Image (cartoon, grey):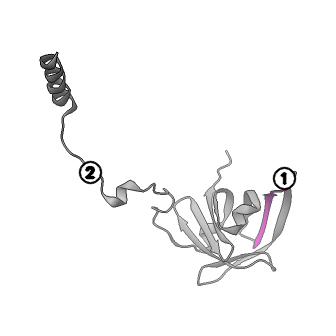
Amino acid sequence: MTILRSALASLAALFCGCASSSLAVEGRAVQDELELLDWRPASAADVLGHWRVRSLNGSAAAVVLDLGYWIDEDGRFSGAALFSGSTPTYEVLSGTWTLTSGGALQLGAEAEPARAEVAGDWLRLSGTQGSLVFERAEIR
């Protein structure tokens, strides 16, 4: 019986390839694909179009379940936000938008300006309430 166990252990070692492996620290953590994008400050041309939220972070994520915007070149925007509650409810958002030369996007006269950054078809808005990442929505 001892010879059989020894033979099985040897075969297991042969087939398992007892090479040691380790994963670098940066490879161990789950990385958000959106954080790996090459973000740059947005221009007015970058923010135009239809956007659907992909990621919500910060205190805004506690109350907003979904968000979409249409941002027009005439300085107007329209959108809808699904707010959480006992019965989640969509509310229409509309008004005018501005983008400063420093990259601060303001959607509506009473809204807090947010830092606007883009990476390809992605738009990230960051402010004191958190950050939102939008994906450009194509209508075909």
Rendering coords of residue 82 (x, y %): 80, 56
From the viewer's side, name the closer residue of 4 and 79: 4
Determine whether, in the image, residue 97 is placed left or right of residue 135. Answer: right
Q: The disc labelled 1 sits on which kind of residue? A: Pro
Q: Quadrant of the N terminus?
A: top left
The label on residue 22 is 2
| Quadrant for the C terminus in the image | top right
Closer to us: 39 or 62: 62
Residue 53, x across and y down, in percent: 67, 57
Mark 1 or mark 2, which is nearer to you?
A: 2
Q: Quadrant of residue 51?
A: bottom right
32 w.r.t. 98: above or below: above
Given residues 47 and 18, the one toward you in this image is 18
Question: From this viewpoint, which residue is outermost toward the front?
Answer: 1
**Image quadrant where residue 12 sits:** top left
**Which type of secondary structure does the marked residue at label 1 adopt?**
loop
Please state which amino acid type lies under the numbered disc 2: Ser
Q: Which residues are magenta?
A: 75-85
Residue 27 occupies quadrant: bottom left
Q: What main secondary structure does the magenta stretch of the protein show?
A: strand
The residue positioned farthest toward the bottom in the image shown: 101
Q: Which residue is mark 1?
A: 88
Calculate the distance from the C-alpha at mark 1 to the C-alpha at mark 2: 46 Å
Spot occupied by residue 49 in the image (x, y as percentages of width and height): 68, 61
Upstream in sequence: badge 1 or badge 2: 2
